[in-house]
Image: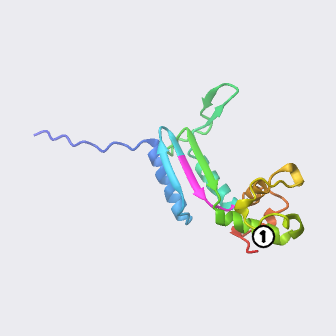
Amino acid sequence: MNSAVAEPKAKPAQVQVAQLIRKELKRRGITNATVRSAQGKVTISVEDLSPKLEKEIKTYVAQFELGHFCGYEDAYVNSNKNNSIPQVKFVFFSNTFSDEMRQKAYDVMQERSPKNYAFLPKEASKIFHYHQDLDHRSVNETIDRVLRGKDILWSGYIWTNDELLDP
């Protein structure tokens, strides 16, 4: 009697990549992440990661991206091919900051430089349209740059050992 046993189908690359990324995020203790896979891409959404941890995660997930889109040639270029791991065409990463984290950063900024922020509301959620003289950007943009570790004047005061300082 010929009994053909159906072999399990191999999972698509995007599913394998998503599983590997979820496993790494879990290993690092990042529980507030969403990892989605579809049509040859993986999308990762997290909240409130420090700049250092964000950079480490981006470095880790970069190995799963097969290449990049070259606008000059208007074509996708397989510049990162690695046959030993599953790969996808695109890996998208998003790190957003909660209102609580934004408020905490704003509190530190107000305490460290009271004369620059004395005329502004005390709640970060109410300062959307206020602009600073420095660099012609809004206070909200400055808060975002601070939380991402891209503001030279503030980031050293805000982040220490991947923890946001208390005001």
Q: Answer yes or no: is residue 21 visible.
A: no
Span colored in magenta:
43-50
Question: Relative to residue 54, is residue 3 depicted above or below?
Answer: above
> What residue is shown with label 1?
108
Q: Residue at x 65, y 66 (%)?
A: 100
For label 1, the crowd category at 10 Å Cα-Cα, with few meaning under 14, some 14 to 19 and many 20 or more, is some
Between 145 and 137, which is closer to the camera in this rendering? 137
Give the total number of marks visible in the rendering: 1
Residue 101: which quarter of the image?
A: bottom right
Residue 154: which quarter of the image?
A: bottom right
How would you classify the magenta stretch by its main secondary structure? strand
Residue 108: which quarter of the image?
A: bottom right
Q: Could you tell whether 121 is left or right of 71 in the image?
A: right
Q: Position of residue 142 (x, y in %)?
A: 79, 56
Residue 47 inside the magenta-drawn segment: yes
Question: Relative to residue 31, is residue 6 depicted above or below?
Answer: above
Q: Residue at x 50, y 56 (%)?
A: 22
Between 70 and 150, which is closer to the camera in this rendering? 150
